[in-house]
Image (tube, helix red, strand yellow):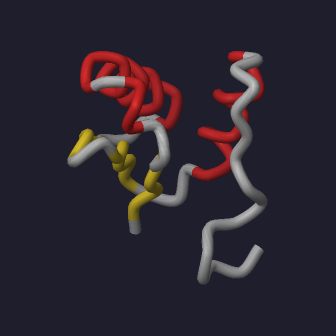
Amino acid sequence: MVTLVAGLHTYGERRLEAMAREFKAACGAGGTVKNGVIEIQGDQLETIRGWFEKQNSGLSVPPSAPGIPS
């Protein structure tokens, strides 16, 4: 299982790579950026949601991804 963070492709590769590094550190997991999508190993939805909340970024994470029960 991987957690995908998508919809931020306009941020640019450098910013996505920096965010991926922060997510990997927060989650204690591996990950990568592919085609504008951050992939973090494992079910990391709550950790990543918390990261966005701490950033006061104005972005939000939906309760569950499409096709995945909440």
Task: Report which quarter residue 65 is drawn in.
Answer: bottom right
The residue most toward the front is: 10
42 over 21 or under it: above or below: below
Compared across the picture, whether 34 is left or right of 43 comes to left
Q: How many marks?
A: 0
Between 31 and 64, the one lying in front of the other is 64
Between 65 and 47, the one lying in front of the other is 65
Q: Quadrant of the C terminus?
A: bottom right
Task: Report which quarter residue 67 is drawn in.
Answer: bottom right
Residue 55 rendering spot, x and y as whole percentages: 69, 16
Residue at 46% from the left image edge and 31% from the top image edge: 23
Residue 45 rendering spot, x and y as whole percentages: 61, 52
Residue 15 rendering spot, x and y as whole percentages: 36, 18
36 over 62 or under it: above or below: above
25 over 7 or under it: above or below: above
Compared across the picture, whether 43 is left or right of 57 comes to left
Task: Report which quarter residue 58 is drawn in.
Answer: top right
Residue at 70% from the left image edge and 20% from the top image edge: 57
2 over 21 or under it: above or below: below
Q: Quadrant of the N terminus?
A: bottom left
Residue at 71% from the left image edge and 81% from the top image edge: 69
Residue at 40% from the left image edge and 61% from the top image edge: 2
